[in-house]
Image: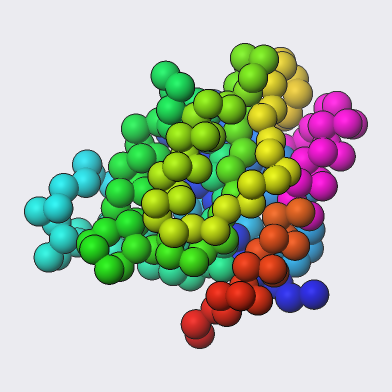
């Protein structure tokens, strides 16, 4: 089985984010074939097409980080029934200028956690709409809406509930298989 580099985005910029804990768990539970690396976006300025002719260095580095991976994983909370503004801003930077969309044909998956009973279901649907427009093939099943409870996941990514750990491990295995299927149709251009 091939190895794949996966860039992951933590949608919350908060240091104590429960989605950061979830991301750490996913890194721990990912199959050996997935090389996980975070793609940070907190230093990006607000996007404006005024930058399209000459991206600032931080935005060029951001787009290069996405270009360097085979697939992307979004680990994000839900803010006001949508995605956090910082994540939307990052997607805007990555998908522009016109004709230089970093997500075109790049396999993606979405997962998130929230204290609420429906996890991040509504925010994920919004993100799916955005990524669909960005021409990113998405893993639509298995869907993952994790209800976060105190002590579910430690800061180091250890999951305290065995059934949740098993689900997350299987989710990452499904993502590995999905990446392989997508890249069979859309081979990497190295």
Q: Is residue 175 magenta?
A: no
Residue farthest to the bottom, as pictured: 190
Q: Is residue 29 left or right of residue 16?
A: right
Expressed as whole percent of the image width and height from the top left, the position of residue 116 reads 62, 14
Q: Main secondary structure of the magenta part?
A: helix
Give residue 45's quadrant in the image.
top left
Expressed as whole percent of the image width and height from the top left, the position of residue 79 reads 44, 23
Expressed as whole percent of the image width and height from the top left, the position of residue 100 reads 30, 68
Is residue 62 visible in the rendered image? The answer is yes
For the record, the magenta segment spans: 156-173
Q: Is residue 60 above or below residue 155?
A: below
Expressed as whole percent of the image width and height from the top left, the position of residue 156 reads 70, 37
Residue located at (82% from left, 38% from top): 167
Q: Is residue 108 left or right of residue 153?
A: left
Residue located at (59% from left, 27% from top): 121
Residue located at (83% from left, 27% from top): 160
Quarter in which the N terminus is drawn: bottom right
Q: Is residue 158 magenta?
A: yes
């Amino acid at each position: 089985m091939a190895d794949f580099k996966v860039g992951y985005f933590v949608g919350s910029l908060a240091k104590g984010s429960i989605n950061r804990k979830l991301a750490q768990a996913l890194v721990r539970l990912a199959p050996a074939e997935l090389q996980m690396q975070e793609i940070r976006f907190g230093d990006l300025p607000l996007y404006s097409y005024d930058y399209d002719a000459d991206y600032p260095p931080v935005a060029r580095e951001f787009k290069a980080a996405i270009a360097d991976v085979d697939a992307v994983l979004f680990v994000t909370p839900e803010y006001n029934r949508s995605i956090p503004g910082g994540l939307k801003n990052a997607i805007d930077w990555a998908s522009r200028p016109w004709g230089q969309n970093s997500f075109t044909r790049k396999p993606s998956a979405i997962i998130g956690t929230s204290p609420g009973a429906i996890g991040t279901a509504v925010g994920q649907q919004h993100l799916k709409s955005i990524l669909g427009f960005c021409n990113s093939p998405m893993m639509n099943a298995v869907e993952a809406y994790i209800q976060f409870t105190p002590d579910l996941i430690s800061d180091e990514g250890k999951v305290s509930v065995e059934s949740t750990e098993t689900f997350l491990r299987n989710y990452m295995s499904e993502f590995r298989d999905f990446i392989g299927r997508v890249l069979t149709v859309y081979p990497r251009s190295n």
